[in-house]
Amino acid sequence: MAVESSAEGDHGGGHETGVPMGLKGDLALWSLVVFFLFLLVLGKFAWKPMIEGLDKREAGIRSAIAEAEQNRKKAEAMLSDYQRQLREAEQHVQSMIAEARRDAERTSQDLIAGAQREVDLLCQRAKDEIRQAKDAALADVFSQLNAQVVLATEHVLGRTLQDSDQERLVTEALASIAR
């Protein structure tokens, strides 16, 4: 039985036999007290600052979102304002182009009308000059013809003609030529 006593001696050394995790009242009480103290310390020194930091971060994110939304609205307002200004500028440019075309057309018509008046005036002057040259040439022809008729008559008659005779003969000669 020596074997038995050695086996009993191993078990009998002040240790209990059974489940090593047995519930002990004083250890459980002290564990609960330490646990609640740990929770109190963590709540005061860790969780409260961590929650405050998270709340601040959340407030910062909310304000950043609100600011971004406000900036988006401002940007949309500016975009619509710029688009409106662009449309107005395009309309203004179109009206300026239309006005420039009207002015160019009007100027073109004025130039054409002025050139036509100049052409008409030049034609009228040319006609007047031609008429004056014709009248001058006819007067010169009649003058030379008159002188020739007088010379021929004097030569035929053998005497000089008086002014009244001279006029009568020229008139008769011209009348016969005109027929």
Image (cartoon, rainbow, N blue to C red):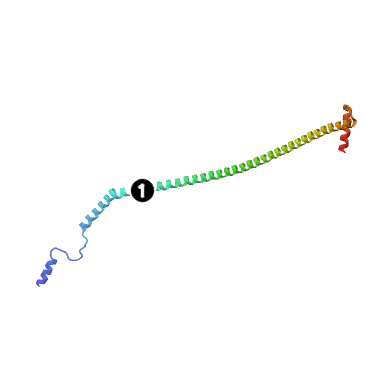
**Image position of 27 (left or right of 176):** left
Residue closest to the eye, 105 or 111: 111
* Residue 152 percent location from the top left of the image: 87, 32
- Residue at image position (11%, 69%) is 6
Q: Residue furthest bottom?
A: 1
Please identify the quarter of the rendering in which residue 149 is found: top right
Q: Position of residue 70 (x, y in %)?
A: 45, 45
**Residue at 50% across / 46% down in the picture?**
79
Q: Which residue is mark 1?
A: 57
Residue farthest top in this picture: 162
Amino acid type, mark 1: Arg
The secondary structure type at the circle numbered 1 is helix
Quadrant of residue 5 in the image? Answer: bottom left
Q: Nearer the viewer, residue 142 or 129?
A: 142
In the picture, the quarter occupied by the C terminus is top right
Seen as rendered, the residue at the extreme right is 157
User: What is the x, y in percent for residue 178?
Assistant: 86, 37
Q: Looking at this view, is 146 or 55 the one in front? A: 146
**Residue 144 image offset from top left, x and y in percent:** 82, 33
The residue lying at 72 percent from left, 37 percent from top is: 122
